[in-house]
Image: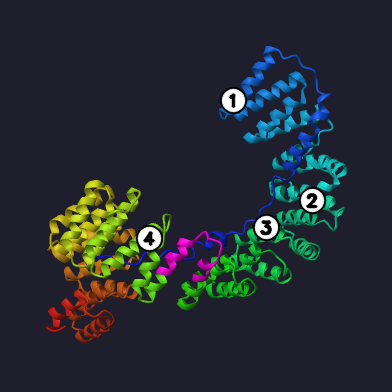
Amino acid sequence: MRMKPLKRTLPLLLALLLPACASVKPQIPAATLDKAVASDAAASAAANEASLPKLELTPEIVYGVLAGEIAARRGASGSAALTYLDLARQTRDPRMAQRAAEFSLLSGLLKEASESLSLWIELDPNSLPAREQLFITLLRSGKLADSKPLIEDLLAREPQRAPAIFVQLARLTMRQDGKADAYRLVSQLAERYPDLPEARFALLAVAAENNDAAAMQREFDRLAIIAPKWDLPVAWQVDRLRRQDMAQASDFLKRELARRPDAGMELKMAYPRLLVGAKRFPEARQAFEALLQNNPDNQDLLYAAGLLAYQLKDLDVAEQRLEKVLKQPTPFREADFVRYTMGQIKEDRHDPAAARDWYQQVGAGPQFLPSQVRLAVLDADDGKLDPALARLSALGDNDQERVSLALLQSQLARDAKQYRQAYDLLTRALQRQPKAGELLYERSLVSDTLGNIGNAERDLRQLLKDKPDDVQALNALGYMLANRTHRAREALGYIEKALKGDPANPVILDSMGWVQYKLGKLDAARKYLEKAYKALPDPEVAAHLGEVLWKLGQQQAARDLWRKELAAHPGHEVLTETMQRLTGKS
């Protein structure tokens, strides 16, 4: 059975860039009016006290208020909203209507919120908070046309709030059902404010909903003149575009930044992040480096440039940038990831002592486990298998981590040719987690290496009992039976099922070729093995293909193939054994 090689557990170095790269989410202030509402409500409370109805606190009112508040405290704010709305209708008290509106909005009951707010306005016609909340609620409900009188009244009463009102229009435009009607209404309102950036943004948003590209471009041109430092509309459009086409989003942002030299750093950094998202790494690195010229100590820029340099194998620059991140006076939020990456760089430079020093500096957090794993691998590479295994035994906070660590322990022991120790480690791990399929599979590999075919078959059959369609286990069992026993016909059934589940997998194609060879079907074997080798130029596949070619009388072709792979993989056991067996020399 083919064993899985131990690989360095490299993190996706760009994963920390991509969350910011994948989306440039504009922070459209949803609570701009809400804050004003709260302020006005507090300021006008004393003034309105005299106009409130003089209520006699009847048992029914007291019970209703208590029932509403208790329901809200227990998480049933929707029930509280209905209770207060009923009280407001009975008492005609705007405070009850206000409370009903608050609980309705908290519960997302927009219909009840509209009713409560309308009643609040009816009972207190001068309440700006009620009007503003109703305006927002109607927009959230997709009823822009119904909100027109409220909007016009608010703009007339409080012209200083026009920016906040237009931002709300921009934010909630996509919720409107009648998009053409919404376009006309917002156009009429925005026409009165030709130099107000928020009005242009609202018109831009509704134009986007109506697919009016020409109008959008006009508004962007206008905004670049009247509000060149306002990043929100640009970020909003980038977020829209990148969901459809990353290249289109990056091209748009590049154009906008060219005419907005004073844009904020977040918007400027969004451009190379988009390039990272599109896997245009050299361009992204160039863009980050350009930003660094004017901001040489910016940690985020240094971090991004360093990671990209590492991605592109420029170890010198990667090291310089990342070390500078850590030398800044402000502690960096991803300092341990930087230290871990520095350890990876030192390993790439074949400097295990320096790598060890970096890994040992990583503290508690997401990078602690991978750093300890690398330290264990370095121990094992240095011939210190027992300390490496002991280090790994002390790790693992959950079952999945413990399974992964047991697998790593096994591979380290196998690499040191300590197969019995690997078997014992896996057996102890399976005593703790007997249903862990990965451990059963790994132990079957070790049993096969030890020559204990019965144990290997037992573990694979146990795995297939729980997961009958596991193509890896099916292939492993079929290959082992074909390679180690005389049960080639039985093996063929397992490999056929595995190949049906994953028809392009070169490892399974190799197994199919090998079992065909064992069945004496040389032409079929050659076909499968050539296909496998084309997809996976692996020395073991080459050994199998060469053996079939040898049996077909193409000895020179077989020798050429073996020599080619042996030059790339000197001393490979399967390849060497095959050549020795068939040619008498390695």
* Quadrant for the C terminus in the image: bottom left
Q: Residue type at mark 4: give it.
A: Pro
Indicate the quadrant where residue 452 lies: bottom left
Tell us which disc is closer to us: 3 or 1. Answer: 1
Please give the count of numbered marks on the rendered protein: 4
Above/below status of 190 relative to 46: below
**Mark 4 to mark 2: distance in Å?**
49 Å
Q: Is residue 412 left or right of residue 181?
A: left
The residue to which callout 2 is attached is: 163
Question: In the rendering, which numbered label is found on residue 370?
Answer: 4
Question: In the rendering, which numbered label is found on residue 452?
Answer: none
The residue to which callout 1 is attached is: 71
- Foreground residue, 319 or 457? 319
Q: Residue type at mark 2: give it.
A: Pro
Indicate the quadrant where residue 508 lies: bottom left
Q: Could you tell me which secondary element the residue under label 4 belongs to?
A: helix
Instruction: State if disc 4 and disc 3 touch (CB < 8 Å).
Output: no
**Mark 2 to mark 1: distance in Å?**
37 Å
Count neighbours of disc 2 (C-alpha within 10 A) and say few if under 14, some if 14 to 19, many if 20 or more: many
- Foreground residue, 267 or 214? 267
The residue to which callout 3 is attached is: 236
The residue at the point 67 percent across, 12 percent down is: 59
Q: Earlier in the sequence, mark 3 or mark 2?
A: 2
Q: Could you tell me which secondary element the residue under label 2 belongs to?
A: helix
